[in-house]
Amino acid sequence: MNDQNLDGPVTLPSSRAPGCPFDPPPELTALARRGEPLTRLAFPDGHVGWLVTGYDAARTVLSDPRFTVRPELRHSPLSRPNVRPGGHDKPPAPGWFANMDRPEHARYRRLLTGRFTFRRMKLLEPRVARITADHLDAMADAGPPVDLVPAFALPIPSLVICELLGVPYDDHAFFEEQTTVAVNLDNTSEQAMAAIGSLARYLGDLVRHKRTRPADDLLSDLITETDLTDEELANIGLLLLVAGHETTAHMLALGTFALLRHPEQLAASALDETAVEELLRYLTIVHLGGPNRAALEDVEIAGRLIREGETVVLGLPAINRDPERFTDPDTLRLDRADARHHLGFGHGVHQCLGQQLARIEMRIAYRALFDRFPTLRLAVPVEDVPMRETAIVYGTWRLPVTWDRS
Ligand code: HEM
């Protein structure tokens, strides 16, 4: 299983298969269970940094301002860098606040946090329920089998984020396709950059259009209520559009897959908030290269000295299965009381802006799906479900399901 020499730097384990498709890569679990929260990590460009697999160490790194998210200061742990507007080795493009440190980051977050609170997102519940019901009706009309990814998992969060931002959903095929190109590590950097470039141009055109014709949506509100430039607005819109549909979509598909593989758990669960948190913990879809940071100065964490300039990768799938934090961590327990302490949405100032929206979407969609199709099951053998091993966000490329017609 793990033939890495644990005394020297390891390379980032990535393949979850061939074991359980929901478990972290076996090599990652082996590293995490050695009792050392940090391990030296060899990066594809020759840099030697760190891999964090311990829960407490992860929280410390993510909340310590001596670590930066700036792309030009970090080494990429991936076979090709994760792309973003302006390039991965340049300072963050205006508005791309996910890659900014404070105080710049706080300036953007302040403009957005109030618009993504639990209370604001709760107002969207009836609309999320309606969108979900419409897609379940369409599935019932089409009849089994269906691929749950395009029929359910992708369109629901996609439509919700489009309506919230004011992006025409008619263009969803375009931005979903471009997003897939950008995040799949099988594509070259050039292909990924071209995809991000076309998405940025699309958002730029949309922002210019909204300046002349503002409507009742978040981008229009930001145009009228702030002094953000068109470029800042386009990049904020792009960040929210990509983060808002890609992640939740794969949680919906992978979560459904996991529930189908644990029928006894499914039968006993109300699929409530607690169950959603446990699925987030157990599945931890932000898996390849996780969040990562670079040290701005020498920092000591868990007895290890991280030198200025070294990049630290957070192995979230292992961190959320840390036995020191979660009892019996490899077991899915939909009623696990402390599941909400998982770091699946990150931690610290960059903690996921859209987490309340994602939680609402998951709670409504899982429940509605299994209420509507109580006999839902896989339409193919488990091994034939193609897993997103090479995508930055884990999940299934397809999820063929079937059910008994009533
Ligand atoms: C940040 C996960 C849904 C928008 C993050 C981070 C994680 C994450 C781990 C932290 C990255 C880091 O620290 O470097 C997830 C998961 C989701 C989800 C698992 C779904 C289940 C969403 C949604 C939106 C969104 C629905 C938009 C509405 C963002 C943004 C950031 C972020 C804008 C950057 C925040 C910042 O840097 O201040 N997300 N996310 N996410 N997420 Fe999410």
Image (tube, helix red, strand yellow):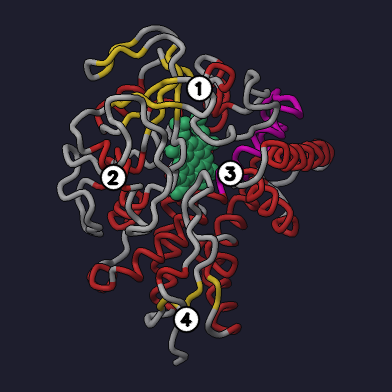
What x and y, as percent, mark residue 282? 31, 51
Mark 1 or mark 4: whose residue is earlier in sequence = 1
The residue that label 1 is drawn on is 46
Tell me, yes or no, whether the two marked residues, 2 and 1, touch with CB atoms within 8 Å: no
For numbered disc 2, what is the local secondary structure?
Answer: helix
**Which portion, as a residue range, is magenta?**
220-244
What x and y, as percent, mark residue 37? 25, 28
In the image, taking residue 212 as reference, residue 33 lies left or right, namely left
Circle 1: residue type: Gly
Query: Is residue 352 in view from this perspective?
Result: no
Circle 4: residue type: Thr
Q: Which mark is residue 402?
A: 4
In the image, taking residue 367 as reference, residue 30 lies left or right, namely left
What x and y, as percent, mark residue 61? 35, 22
- Above or below — where is 393 with respect to 197? below
Residue drawn at (30%, 33%), measured in percent from left and top? Answer: 53
Comparing labels 3 and 2, the label whose residue is closer to the camera? 3
**Residue 234 lies in the magenta-colored region:** yes
Query: Is residue 394 in view from this perspective?
Result: yes
Tell me, yes or no, whether the two marked residues, 3 and 2, touch with CB atoms within 8 Å: no
